[in-house]
Amino acid sequence: MDSRLKYSGFIPADESNSNACLNLELEKLLGDLQGASYAYFAAPRNREVAPLIISNYPSRWLKAYKNANYHLIDPIIHHGLKSCAPFSWSDALQAASCDKSRELFRRSSQFRICSGATFTLHDACGMFSSLSLCNSGSQAEFERRMADQQGQLQMALIRFHSRLLSLRAMDELFPEPQTGPLSARELGVLKWVMMGKAYREIALICAISERTVKFHMSNISGKLQVCNAKQAVYEAQRQGIL
């Protein structure tokens, strides 16, 4: 399995407080469904990077899901990528053609994760995100609540997704795979710096925010153990990176 798809963690370890805050914020948005088992999933559609997952599912299951890259065979994620409307997990399972997908559900059932509903979002940045609610009680009552609160839950997903992107740049959430000291994106930014482009210009060229350019330059300087952009260019040339 492609090691580039391995998780680096749901949220970096040194941001555990931030992770807890995100969980609390999502739970508040769930309103009457606070206390329900949930999972928020987000990933760019056009890049092979590890997804972001914010969830209160059992830690053992989350760890197993993470380590085995189960998102690659998860029928909920596969169905969500093709769906714009909320759907039940039974619909996703019926559409699943892979035995591995069904086996994944059998494993999740050991943690009482076997029935639920998922809401999806495909944003203008090319990112897919979903909010899944797990049913732990009566199926009929769960379906009634999902139908009654469908609009509220879809808005909860939209608001949380927007809030997350306002707190972190896309490239912070989903860093590019690295094949050398610098990632492909970092190398591209540094090449434009070497050509004398200002951060504002680089942001326009690369279709990213100026804040993200500064984020990359901070990472570059740290990796090359220098203090500023000029030194970073010199050190990268000295090492043969540029």
Image (cartoon, rainbow, N blue to C red):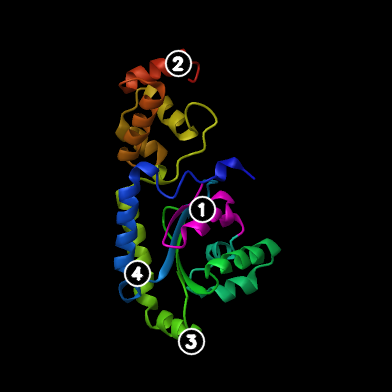
Q: CA distance from mark 3 to mark 1?
A: 31 Å
In the image: residue 102, left or right of residue 234: right
- The residue under the point 34% across, 39% down is 212
Q: Where does the image place residue 179, in percent across and percent down from the top left? A: 55, 31
- Decide whether residue 56 is among the magenta residues: yes
Q: Quadrant of the N terminus?
A: top right
Q: Earlier in the sequence, mark 4 or mark 2?
A: 4
- The residue under the point 47% across, 61% down is 58
Given the image, on which type of amino acid does mark 2 rest? Answer: Gln
Q: CA distance from mark 1 to mark 2?
A: 41 Å
- The reply to whether dot 1 and dot 4 touch (C-beta < 8 Å) is no
Residue 63, numbered circle: 1
In the image: residue 73, left or right of residue 42: right
- Range shown magenta: 50-73
Q: Where does the image place residue 187, in percent across and percent down from the top left? A: 46, 28
Residue to which mark 3 is pinned: 140
Query: In terms of secondary structure, where does tag 4 sit?
Result: helix
User: Which one is nearer the viewer's eye here, 133 or 233?
Assistant: 133
Residue 237, numbered circle: 2
